[in-house]
Amino acid sequence: MPHLPRVRAIRYVTPLREGGSLPGVVEADDLGTYVAKFRGAGQGPKVLVAEVIVGQRAPHSGILTTEAGLWRNASRS
């Protein structure tokens, strides 16, 4: 499996009102701002796993995607 970058989320900025996964914008310890999808959202963790798999396979089919990564909530260390 390809390496997925990991960052620590330090601040929840705002919810995004699009899609069933209820994503939100978070700031991370690397000073980046990311769209985060949450494990407890309505679609469940299986959909998040499927998104990672498809995101890793898409470039091999000529489909451009954004970089995927994993993040951890700073308050949970």
Image (spheres, rainbow, N blue to C red):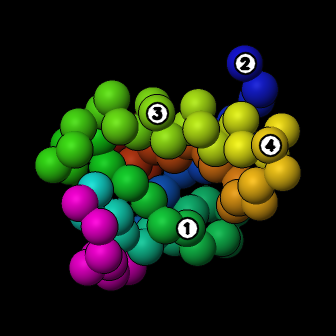
- Residue contact at pointers 2 and 3, CB within 8 angstroms: no
- Indicate which label's residue lies in the foreground, 3 or 4: 4
Q: Nearer the viewer, residue 25 or 57?
A: 57
How many angstroms separate mark 1 from mark 4 (CA)? 25 Å
Residue 77 sits above or below residue 33 on the image: above
Q: Residue at x 50, y 41 (%)?
A: 51
Looking at the rendered structure, the secondary structure element under dot 2 is: loop
Looking at marks 4 and 2 on the same chain, the residue that comes earlier in the sequence is marked by 2
Looking at the rendered structure, the secondary structure element under dot 1 is: strand
Residue 4 position in % (x across, y down)? 69, 36
Looking at marks 1 and 4 on the same chain, the residue that comes earlier in the sequence is marked by 1
Residue 6 shows up from this direction: no
**Which residue type does callout 2 highlight?**
Met
- Indicate which label's residue lies in the foreground, 2 or 3: 3
Q: Which numbered disc covers residue 1? A: 2
Q: Which numbered disc covers residue 34? A: 1
Q: Which numbered disc covers residue 61? A: 4
Q: What residue sits right under mark 3 in the picture?
A: 50
Q: Residue at x 59, y 38 (%)?
A: 54
Looking at marks 3 and 4 on the same chain, the residue that comes earlier in the sequence is marked by 3
How many angstroms separate mark 1 from mark 2 (CA)? 22 Å
Residue 33 sits above or below residue 72 on the image: below
How many angstroms separate mark 1 from mark 3 (CA)? 19 Å
Looking at marks 1 and 2 on the same chain, the residue that comes earlier in the sequence is marked by 2
Query: Magenta residues, as a range?
Result: 12-20
